[in-house]
Image (spheres, rainbow, N blue to C red):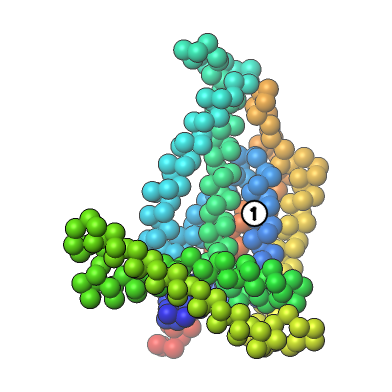
Amino acid sequence: MDDWGGVSNDERHDKMNRDTFAGFHPTINFLYFAALIGFAMFFTHPVCQGLSLLCAISYSVFINGKKSIRFNLMYMLPMLLVTALLNPMFSHQGATILLYLPSGNPLTLESILYGVSAAVMLITVISWFSCFNSVITSDKLVYLFGRILPALSLVLAMSLRFVPRFRAQMKIISNAQKGLGRGISHGNIMQKAKHGIKILSIMVTWALENSIETADSMKGRGYGLPGRTAFSIFRFDSRDRYAFAFILACSAAIVIGSAIGLYDFRYYPTVKGVWTGAANIFAFMLYFALAAFPMMVNLRFAKNSSLRLSSDVV
């Protein structure tokens, strides 16, 4: 295990090699997720929400594989259904009345559609944040904010890696105690409780010692002092410049399109929004191009790799 969220070096390198977008400069990664998460939070047009959700889930599955699929089916899908059902239960606005509930309140089409929209927005933002957590590692956070906000960047980096490191260390200690016959599955109820308290005590001691060692290490390295230099493996190359220009241009065009009403959509008192028209279709295409940018980069990289492999074989 290393300090990268309790993940082994081999697993980290495999993930970084598989995801070309994660190999971009941290500024590109952060700018992209800031734009997509912001648009996902404020755009309520069904086309934009559908495109963003599709791209977020696709990228999440591409990064995390089966773990992401299991998470989406076990947690995200039930959350989507529950959130979609809550709004029509408490909100009865809208002009299109479908039926009357036993309480006498109307069930409207607008409240159902708004509930679905709110649920999709929630799931989309969570999916993008899961991708953000996989791509923006602790070293990237320190690189981005270390000079501007050194204390905040350190706290964020340590917070992001604390849970996976704590979980990995808990597994190690539990296995060690289990090998000694003092696991939480050994003995009666009182003995199991005693073993659990022992494991928890070891974990707390490890966490405190680790925090002291980290603080001493950062102090010895002069973290946060004025004029302190830092080694960085990140370089802003020509590929990053093209990506920066693409993300900035698409984001600016989307903001302008939103300002002139190309993404406007309302649910109350009646459902109303623009779906067709050359300008709207072009605006949706821009939104899709930005949302699918990581997958397009990875697909292009995989295609180039296969072409190079074929040429080498020939």
State whether residue 168 appears in this view.
no
Q: Nearer the viewer, residue 252 or 308?
A: 252
In the picture, the quarter occupied by the N terminus is bottom left
Q: Circle 1 is placed at which residue position?
A: 37
Horizontal arrangement in the rendering, residue 19 relative to residue 252 (left or right)? left
Percent of width and height locating residue 124 = 56, 49
Residue positioned 72% across, 38% down in the render: 264
Q: Secondary structure at mark 1?
A: helix
Horizontal arrangement in the rendering, residue 128 relative to residue 142 (left or right)? left
Q: Kindly identify the amino acid type of the residue bearing the numbered disc 1.
A: Ile
Q: Nearer the viewer, residue 58 or 206?
A: 206
- The vertical placement of 222 against 136, above or below, is below
Mark 1 residue crowding within 10 angstroms, few (<14) / some (14–19) / many (20+): some
State whether residue 155 appears in this view.
yes
Horizontal arrangement in the rendering, residue 116 relative to residue 164 (left or right)? right
Percent of width and height locating residue 50 = 56, 45
- The vertical placement of 53 against 159, above or below, is above
